[in-house]
């Protein structure tokens, strides 16, 4: 018999963010499919696409579509059901979550997200500022600047061309 091991906090934070991102990707796919259906001249059947095995969430979304309501109503209802069922275990009963966005010059965004989850009352920090860098230093995350690299240069080039 193998011993049961709990996932590490880093894995949990990464799982939280990747689960959320994957769920968002599935929803985008769903909305795109709904929009494609609207393009055809003949009415197309309602369609629910789910890349995960969350049957109750899929059924909830389907019920909304079958009742004639909008695709966005269906997405909202499906996501609500997934949150109720805690489908991907990304937040769970502890309600602990940490997320970051627009940290373009910080290498270790996952470390910042974990620190947000473990050391603040916040759930989401957005943007680059001295306060975020100070937060990284205070939490000893080691959020070094990305500085250089092809992606960084590409972004600077597009900004200089007003893209």
Image (spheres, grey):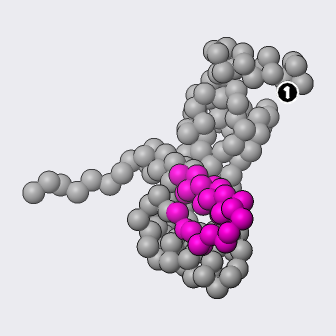
**Can residue 162 be found in the magenta stretch?**
no
Classify residue 140 by image quadrant.
top right
Look at the image and tell me in which quarter the C terminus lies: top right
Residue 127 vertical position relative to residue 66 in the rendered view, above or below: above
Q: Position of residue 38 (x, y in %)?
A: 71, 64
Bin the neighbour count of mark 1 within 10 Å (Cα to Cα): few under 14, some 14-19, many 20 and up.
few
Residue 11 vertical position relative to residue 26 in the rendered view, above or below: above
The majority secondary structure of the magenta stretch comes to: helix
Relative placement, left or right, of 86 versus 65 is left
Tell me what residue is drawn at x 55 percent, y 68 percent.
48
User: Can residue 34 be seen at all in this image of the molecule?
Assistant: yes
Front residue of 148/64: it is: 64
Tell me what residue is drawn at x 72 percent, y 59 percent.
39
Query: Which secondary structure lies at badge 1?
Result: loop
Relative placement, left or right, of 134 versus 59 is right
Q: Position of residue 4 (x, y in %)?
A: 23, 57
In the rendered image, the residue lying farthest to the bottom is 67
In the rendered image, the residue lying farthest to the right is 162
Q: Position of residue 137 (x, y in %)?
A: 65, 31
Front residue of 145/44: it is: 44
Q: Position of residue 120 (x, y in %)?
A: 64, 53
Q: What segment carries the magenta color?
A: 22-49
**Can residue 44 be found in the magenta stretch?**
yes
Classify residue 1 by image quadrant.
bottom left
Give the labeled residue for mark 1: 163
Q: How many marks?
A: 1
User: Can residue 76 be seen at all in this image of the molecule?
Assistant: no
Tell me what residue is drawn at x 68 percent, y 69 percent.
42
In the rendered image, the residue lying farthest to the front is 42
Tell me what residue is drawn at x 70 percent, y 80 percent.
69
């Amino acid at each position: 018999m193998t011993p049961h091991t709990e996932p590490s906090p880093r894995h949990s934070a990464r799982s939280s963010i990747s689960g959320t991102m994957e769920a968002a990707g599935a929803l985008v796919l769903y909305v795109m499919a709904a929009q494609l259906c609207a393009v055809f001249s003949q009415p197309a059947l309602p369609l629910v696409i789910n890349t995960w095995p969350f049957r109750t969430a899929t059924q909830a979304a389907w019920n909304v579509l079958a009742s004639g309501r909008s695709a966005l109503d269906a997405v909202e209802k499906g996501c609500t059901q997934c949150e109720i069922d805690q489908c991907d275990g990304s937040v769970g009963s502890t309600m602990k979550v940490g997320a970051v966005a627009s940290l373009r010059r910080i290498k270790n965004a996952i470390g910042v997200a974990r620190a947000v989850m473990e050391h603040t009352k916040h759930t989401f920090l957005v943007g680059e500022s001295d306060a975020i860098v100070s937060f990284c230093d205070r939490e000893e995350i080691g959020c070094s600047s990305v500085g250089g690299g092809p992606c960084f240069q590409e972004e600077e080039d597009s900004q200089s061309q007003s893209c």
